Image (cartoon, rainbow, N blue to C red):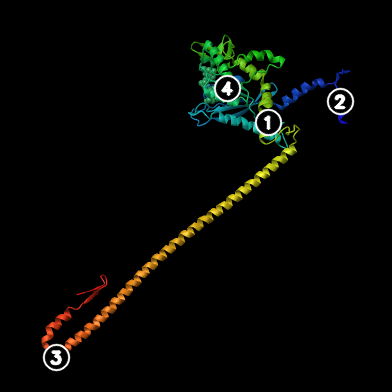
């Protein structure tokens, strides 16, 4: 088909035709429902709130069951994420529910990094899903999707305002997950205070640019109830698994000396509104938003980071093959550059070592020359001394000979002239009798 024919064909208006009888594709929605029911659903809730704020109690109350609970200690050195998965069944619908607790949240003295493990956990679940999508053999059909569909953010019922930890954490999470803020233990705050508290929280969220999940109003069937509920945010909830007799009915409530707070009584708290919005009306929208908004954002950033683009600089579609080739070339270039860098580093190191060795050799040589000079000087001095000594010895020998000659002459004369004896004796004894090496002189 020529290009112009193709264009004409695609631009042609679609014509509506009526069917002559029942064909059967009106069963498509039923087929879809049936398939989904067989497949089962997964829903993952992240509970963020300080230790003991009532997270586990609320989960038990919401799903009308008793999940495993383990009291967290207040001495965790950092926030840690603890996921627990349960298989629930209602009628013939199977729900794989994962509840993730941010254990130790708000317990550290320095809370600067409290949000980080939560963000990392959410990103890891996105990353796992992306890796599965990028596999050659994907099995998304039976993949256990652990991406967080909703974050219930438990606000402490102080009646004042949000803490900076709440604002920072919600701000860090709002582009990654659907946040539903709830005021926990709402039975501990009076009705008028609660009203003011809600207004304060919403205005603080708006002024700090924190995007919370808005119940969708584009589907006519739920638009009205959702827009009414949006105005009730944040929900003020009370949790209890205790059953109390009110009239002749057993209801879940918290009993106090002055009265009973009924969890499912809408004039007591917003628990019913939360359950309605979270489970009965918007569970599918939360799942969808997670996939189409939050996961999409993560996927787009990740692929862009890896160098993938939709269009090239000329606005032409970018092919995966081209991107791969460009990336490969970039990678090889980088590898070569690194290799060259390493080689240069090695050469420099060898040169440095060589220079050091040369310097050491020169120093040794200088030392040797110096010692040699000292040695020669010493040798010269010793030589001189030896010469002096020899001269002294010669002199001594000469004098000795002279003395001996004199002695023999005087002996001869004595034998001839006995009177001269005393005088010669005196001369004989005045001759030097020893030579001192230390002073270099003859001593008597
Ligand atoms: P950790 O998992 O240890 O962080 O605690 P948690 O947030 O799961 O709190 P948990 O549900 O264990 O409740 C802690 C205490 O608060 C229990 O004594 C609950 O009975 C009580 N509690 C729970 N919900 C409410 C509530 O809505 N109002 C009041 N007044 N107390 C509540
Ligand atoms: Mg708990």
Which callout, 1 or 4, points at the residue further toward the start of the chain? Answer: 4
Q: CA distance from mark 4 to mark 3?
A: 146 Å
- Do labels 2 and 1 touch, CB within 8 Å? no
Reading the chain from its start, which is encountered first: label 3 or label 2? 2
**Can you identify the residue that label 3 sits on?**
416
Q: Residue furthest left?
A: 419
Q: Nearer the viewer, mark 1 or mark 4?
A: 1
Name the residue tied to disc 1: 300
The answer to which of marks 2 and 4 sits earlier in the sequence is: 2
The mark closer to the camera, 2 or 1, is: 2
Q: Which residue, as the protein is rendered here, is positioned at the far top?
A: 247
Front one among 349 and 106: 349
Foreground pick, 126 / 46 = 126
Marks 3 and 2 sit apart, C-alpha to C-alpha, by: 170 Å
Disc 2 from disc 1: Cα separation: 34 Å
Secondary structure beneath disc 1? Answer: helix
> Circle 4 sits in a helix, a strand or a loop, which is it?
strand
Which residue is identified by label 4? 153
Q: Is residue 230 above or below residue 294?
A: above
């Amino acid at each position: 088909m020529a290009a112009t024919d193709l264009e004409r064909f695609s631009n042609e208006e679609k014509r509506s035709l009526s069917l002559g009888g029942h064909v059967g594709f009106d069963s498509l929605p039923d087929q879809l429902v049936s398939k989904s029911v067989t497949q089962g659903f997964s829903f993952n809730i992240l509970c963020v709130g300080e230790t003991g704020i009532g997270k586990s109690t609320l989960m038990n109350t919401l799903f009308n069951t008793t999940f495993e609970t383990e009291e967290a200690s207040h001495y965790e050195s950092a926030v840690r994420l603890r996921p627990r998965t349960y298989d629930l069944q209602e009628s013939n619908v199977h729900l794989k529910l994962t509840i993730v607790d941010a254990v130790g949240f708000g317990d550290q003295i320095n809370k600067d990094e409290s949000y980080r493990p939560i963000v990392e956990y959410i990103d890891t679940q996105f990353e796992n899903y992306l890796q599965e999508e990028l596999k050659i053999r994907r099995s998304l059909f039976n993949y256990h999707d652990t991406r967080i569909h909703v974050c219930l953010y438990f606000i402490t019922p102080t009646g004042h305002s949000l803490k900076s930890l709440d604002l920072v954490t919600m701000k860090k999470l709002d582009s990654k997950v659907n946040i539903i803020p709830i005021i926990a233990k709402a039975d501990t705050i009076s009705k008028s205070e609660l009203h003011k508290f809600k207004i304060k929280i919403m205005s603080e969220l708006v002024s700090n640019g924190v995007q919370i999940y808005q119940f969708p109003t584009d589907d006519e069937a739920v638009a009205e109830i959702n827009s009414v509920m949006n105005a009730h945010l944040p929900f003020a909830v009370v949790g209890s698994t205790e059953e109390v007799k009110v009239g002749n009915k057993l209801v879940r409530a918290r009993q106090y000396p002055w009265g009973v707070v009924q969890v499912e009584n809408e004039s007591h708290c917003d628990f019913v509104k939360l359950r309605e919005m979270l489970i009965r009306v918007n569970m599918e929208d939360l799942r969808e938003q997670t996939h189409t908004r939050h996961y999409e954002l993560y996927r787009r950033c990740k692929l862009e980071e890896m160098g993938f683009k939709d269009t090239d600089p000329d606005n032409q579609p970018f092919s995966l093959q081209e991107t791969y080739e460009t990336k490969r070339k970039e990678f090889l270039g980088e590898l070569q550059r690194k290799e060259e860098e390493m080689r240069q580093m090695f050469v420099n190191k060898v040169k440095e070592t060589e220079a050091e060795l040369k310097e050491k050799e020169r120093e040794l040589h200088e030392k040797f020359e110096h010692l040699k000079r000292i040695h020669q000087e010493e040798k010269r001095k010793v030589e001189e001394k030896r010469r002096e000594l020899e001269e002294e010895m010669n002199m001594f020998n000469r004098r000795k000979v002279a003395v001996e000659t004199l002695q023999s002459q005087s002996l001869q004369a004595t034998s001839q002239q006995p009177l001269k004896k005393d005088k010669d004796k005196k001369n004989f004894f005045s001759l030097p009798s020893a030579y001192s090496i230390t002073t270099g002189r003859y001593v008597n």
